Every structure is written in structure tokens, then in C-alpha cells.
Image: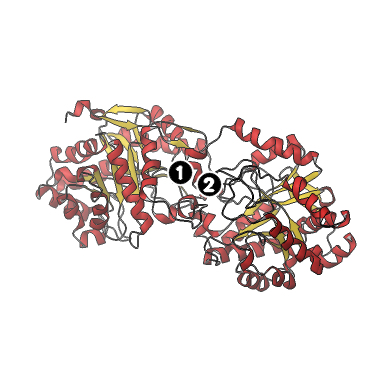
Amino acid sequence: MSVKSNTVNTVLGPVSAGELGVVSVHEALLSVVPGAEHAYDITIDRAEIFETLAAKLKDFRAHGGGTIVDSTGMFHGRDVRLYETLSRTTGVHIVASTGQGPEEKLGGYFLTPQTNPPTPWPAEKFADLFTREVTEGMVVPRVERRGAAGLVATTATAEGMTATDESLFRGAARTALNTGVAVSLRYGADAVHDLDVVLDEKLPADRVAVGGLDREDAVAAGAPLEVARRGAYAVLDHVGTEGGGHLTDAERAALVADLVRGGFGHRILLSSNATGVAKGHPGNDLPYSHVLTAFVPLLKERGLGDEDVRRILVDNPRDLLSVR
Amino acid sequence: MRTIIKVLYSKVSVVSRVNTVLGPIPAEELGLVAIHEHIGYGMPGSELDTKWWKTPEQRYEETVPKLRAFHEYGGGTFVDATGICNGRDVDYYKSLSAKTGVHIVACTGFVGGDTALYHFAKADVDYLTRQFVHEITVGIGDTGSRAGVIKVGVSRGGRMTDLDKRIYRAAARAALTTGVPILTHLAIDAENAIAIFDEEGLPLDRVLFGHVDDGVNADKTRDVWIAEQGGRIGFDTFGYETELPDPPFWARPRQERLDHFLRFIGDGRLKQVLASADANCSPLGWPGVKGHTVNYIFEDLIPDLRAAGLDEAAIKTIFVDNPADFLALQK
């Protein structure tokens, strides 16, 4: 596999993988809880949203960032045309994602369709819906398709994967097999179990990024190492968030150093799960540059060299996002 | 007849008003009302599936002739019962109303808990009440149009879910606060619905218990009992018939539905019924039912009622007077 020949689907079209630079793989640009767009007490001012997001992307770029991945899928406020304009204006590459989940965030169309009985969608239908967002383009609902999705993202229910979550995961895995984009999953209660569901679809492990592995319960279960051992990417995706069931940044840095020492430096990804603009939920108002400005120094203190850091921030996400 | 209905059903109202998408109108101007219809209905999320997409030209082509025919037949008002997350599109309704001359009443509320998206599914009764009251008294989104009815309903499965119950309770509170009536999707599990309305102190003549005539649920719907409690009864899926070339699963033999309706009003309940076709002008997230439109009311239903011996006064009661009493804001 030659890096030069690989491309990544950005909102402005395919970009050579070598051009991505520093990538933050699990972030949100505009994040709207499904239904919040209809709420009487929520205003969606696109000009204001643009201004806020543009400032955050410029800050990311000013600190050495190259690419932001909006990994919130197709039904959580994704606004492809806004992202195109943001990318053009700020020079930051933006990769948008298809996918949905967990079950409770889905519309009734997928859960109680107008059939008798109202059987929830199976994996194959989700695979078709997501695949066409890569092969034909991402939807602007009821208006048009735009550029190709660069990733398929899904999430399992916090209390544990439901039957419909499993359909979403299997549909995401089949989408990756059909199209060559990678799967980004956020586990529910058991990271290794949830990863195994997509691996059961015969998707190579190196096409999967498992998020949430800086949760205390993931670490207690040994999940970061186990995910890396299986060959998937272990994503510590709440850098900058401390408490609420997450590691501190100091503990995260120690975990990264352990994984690197254990020979898994090529299986680590970092991100902040920052929310550029949140509607209908509190969001996570960290700058996208937090990993670069605050966390990389902690990694250096732990003895990581420039090569290690580059591998984690540039090479690993490049390999993940390259369409196979 | 009208005076009698007023005595039976209305509290004193200084000015009789109904919220339409183009502004309040006097109830006297409603004319013949189709009480439970859809410009276009789709389950939430169906907008992501290109299978159902239509161009704006196609939508207007499918919709405008039906509304113009409705108007020419003598139809006055079209009540759109499409819930908040089901593709309700008030700006579109405004343009349709302005160009066709048909009054369109939009709703707040949800077709059922299973059509409320996450933001609302997680909300408590107070928040849902504020959402409904805002849409009735201030407006829907930034359209400036106020909702004229509240839609509630029973989720798939036959029993009210906890979310359905929160929506019913919020609707009752919003109805009491604003004076608009409530229109239900399905009248099964009515004991639970009526218990909530009673607890909230909402008179049951402010509630239209809909779809008592639908093919799946008619046998399980206690229409007479609901009427005895004081509720209004919606025979509002007229035209979804097993005789259609491709009937939906909720279809019912034409004569069976008509007999059901005639039997019901024959027992002295003419003033408690409303009738409609629940058709989609241009469906949003499902194929729709070919050949079924709001104009079934004029083309089939009213002729059938006349043939069955109903006089013009009775027809006026069902389609003009009862809806006017129901829709007029009551405080």
C-alpha cells in the first residue's frame, strides 16, 4: 500500500492522504440532538454557528492541526454545505461521517416502520443506507446528495448493545467492506464485545476505531490493550475531559505511554470529543487544539519522542481514513 | 341544531377564533372541515432515505390539484394532523393555503410517542407543555403561524407507553391553557387516556378520539363507552378500503365502516362525531395509497350518507357545525 496513491473523502472531495496533517478523529462540528431543531427554545442561526466554528477551526490550524473528523454521523446536526464552506474558509480539511446510533437516537422510520408488525430495520438496510452515503454522496434531507462520507460512525447504548444497535454495527461493518471507508464506533457497556460484532462481519480490525477507551470502565476492563491487540485502533477520545467516569489527562498520558512501550504505538488515536456548537445538549466546549497544546506536552514528559507523537497524530489517522 | 350543540359542548367564548396557518379566522368561516388529514406524512428519519424523495415540482403537482378540487367541491378547511417530527412544514402549508383558498389548520404535538425524536422523547411533561403552548400562542418555529389543534396518539403496540402518557398529559395542560382542542391518533387504550384527561380536568368534548373506524383497531376500540364519557368520536379513516387495488394493512371493507358509522350516529350520537379521510396529498416517507384523497369526503362519503338517508342538516352537523364547535378556541 502506497500512501501517495491513497485518498481520503473530505467534504470538498477526495484528498491525498498525505495532505491531512494532524488529524483529530472524534470531534463534532455542529451537534444537534435529534428533534432539537424543532424545539421552541432552541435557535439555529447558521451565520452565528459558522462564525463560532470557523474561529475554532482557525485556532486548530494555528496550533498545527490539519484535519477535523466530524464523527457524529448523518442524524445529529450534520450540515454538509456548512462544512464545505468552513473548510474552504479556514483551510482545515473536514471529513464528515455517515452512520447513526445508538438506538434511542434513531427516528421512528427505522424502529417502528409503517408495516405490520413494525419490525425495526435489519443490518442489511442500514448497510445500504450508509453505503450510498459513500458511493452516491451524503444527503441534505429531501434536497440533494453532496460529497462522499469519509467514515461510518455508530454508537451502542450505554447500558449495553441492543438488537437494533447490533444491526447498526453490522450495517456499519458491511458499509466499510462495500466502500473502503473505516468504521468508527463508540462502545456501549463492553468495548471488546462491541468491536467483536463488527469483526464478526469479516471486517479487518485495522479498519475500525474504537472510541471511549479513556473511560474508567474501559481501562478497568483492560479494553485499550485488548482492542489494540486485536488490531483495531484504540481511541482515547475525551482528552481534556476529567471526571464523570473518565481518566484525567495525566492518567491518559500514562496509558498512551504504556501502550507505546507495549509496541502498540501504531494502534493509538487521540481526540477530544469537542463540540464546536451544541444544540439541545451541553456539549463539550474544548478547543479542537487541546490535544496539540495541552496533551502533547504531557506525552513528552512521559518520554514519548516526536516520532511517537507524529505516528499517533498524523500517520495512524491517515491510515484509518485512507479509503481502501 | 347549532344552538343545541352550543349548549351541549361550548363554554362561553367571547370571540370565536380558530388558528390557521395564515392567521386566526372566525369559526363561522371554517365551512366544511376535513378534520384529520395530511399534506404529507413521513416517519421521522424517512427524510434520510432518498427512496421517498420528490422534487418540489412533483410535490406541488400532487398536492395543489387535490386542494383546488377540495375547494371547488365546497371544502372550507383542511386540518393537518402531521406531528412535529413527521415532516410538518408550515411554510409550505402557508403557500398552499394562500394559493388554493383552502384554510389549513396545523397542529402541535406528536402522532405518537414513537414519532417523537430523542429531544422530545427525553422531555418531561412541563417541557412538552411549554413546547405545545408556545406553538399555539407564539408560533411554530419562525413561521409566525400558530397551531390550531394538538395531536397525540398511541404508539405501535396497542398500549400507551410512558412517553405517550406524558404527551397526553402535556396536551391536556396546553389545551386548558390555550383553549385549542386535542385530536388523537387511535382511540385504543382509552381508559388510560381518559384517566389522564380527567386528572387534568379537561372536559372530554375538547378531545376527538380518532381512528375508531380503522380496520386494525375498530374491534378493540370502545367508541360507545368513550362517547358516554363525553368524548368526541372520529370516524376519520374513511376511504382506506379493502376494495382498493393495493390497500394498506389498516384498510377495512367499505360497507362495514359505513355501517359502523350509521349505527353509531343512529344511536343519537350525531353531535359527537367527526368524519375525515386521513389521506396524504403527497406522502413523505411511505408510498401512500393510490386513489385515496381528501376528496373521498365529497366523491364517496357524502353520497353514501345521502343514500343511507341522512338529510342535509345531518350532513352539515357532521362536517360544519361539529368541527366549528370543536376547533373554536375555548377558554
Query: Residue A182 appears at what percent x and percent y?
Result: 28, 40
What is the x, y in percent for residue B263? 76, 65
Percent from the top left, x then y, of residue B330?
A: 78, 60
> Which residue is disc 2 drawn over?
A37
Q: Point out the tag, 1 or 2, that comes first from the N-terminus.
A: 2
Q: Chain of mark 1?
A: A
- State the SS at label 2: helix
Q: Is residue B90 above or below residue A186?
A: above
Name which quarter of the figure residue B201 lies in: bottom right
Identify the chain of the residue marked 2, using the numbered disc in the image: A
> What is the quadrant of the C terminus of chain B in the image?
bottom right
Q: Quadrant of the N terminus of chain B?
A: bottom right
Question: Crowding at label 2, few (<14), some or many (≥20) Cα neighbours within 10 Å?
Answer: some
Q: Position of A22 compared to B321: left or right?
A: left
Left or right: A232 with respect to B169?
left
Q: Which is more toward the observer, A252 or A226? A: A226
Q: Are marks 1 and 2 on the same chain?
A: yes
Q: Nearer the viewer, residue B180 or A230?
A: A230
| Amino acid type assigned to the residue bearing label 1 in the image | Gly
Disc 2 residue type (three-letter): Glu
Q: Position of residue B125 (x, y in %)?
A: 57, 64
Left or right? Give the position of A317 relative to B320: left
In this rendering, would A256 be left or right of A293?
Answer: left
Residue at horizontal 81 percent and vertical 63 percent from the top: B271
Location of mark 1 (residue)? A77
Picture quarter containing residue B167?
bottom right
Dot 1, crowdedness within 10 Å: few (<14), some or many (≥20)? Answer: many
Along the viewing direction, whichever of A80 and A129 lies nearer the viewer? A129
In the image, residue A135 sits, relative to residue B138, either above or below, namely: above
* Residue depicted at x 77% and y 62%: B262
C-beta proximity under 8 Å, tags 1 and 2: yes
